[in-house]
Amino acid sequence: MVTNPQYVVHDSRTRQARARMAQNAERRRGTLHTWLRTALERMRVRHELRHDLARIDERLSRDAGISLTELQREAAKPFWRR
């Protein structure tokens, strides 16, 4: 069997390109997973902080130098908003 060197090089390049594509896909999957985990953690923290803000009374808000209406407005925001 006679093989044409041109096809052998092409086949090798194709294998290398497929391997790079698979590595890139794996990297993107990892990046998406990391992004999603970070976003969910941020939302959880916001939820907890806003829950705590809702429990602050007028005396504590004066001590912090923030009006009670500002605290209530922030506490009323949904957890997915900044």
Image: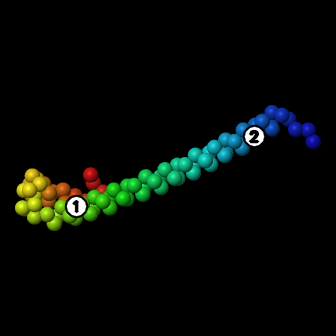
28 on left or right of 73: right
Residue at image position (58%, 46%) is: 24
Q: In front: 69, or 49?
A: 49
10 on left or right of 27: right
Q: Residue furthest right?
A: 1
Which residue matches tag 1?
50
Kind of element beneath mark 2: helix
Residue at image position (14%, 59%) is: 72
Kind of element beneath mark 1: helix
Q: Amino acid at mark 1?
A: Arg
Residue at image position (75%, 37%) is: 10
Which image quarter: residue 81? bottom left
- Residue 51, position in %: x, y? 22, 64
Please tell me whether residue 19 is drawn above or below residue 80 in the rendered image. Answer: above
Which residue matches tag 2?
12
Q: Quadrant of the N terminus?
A: top right
Residue at image position (10%, 64%) is: 57
> Would you say residue 62 is visible in this rendering?
yes
Label 1 to label 2, Cα distance in Å? Answer: 57 Å
Q: Residue furthest top?
A: 6
- Residue 53, position in %: x, y? 18, 61
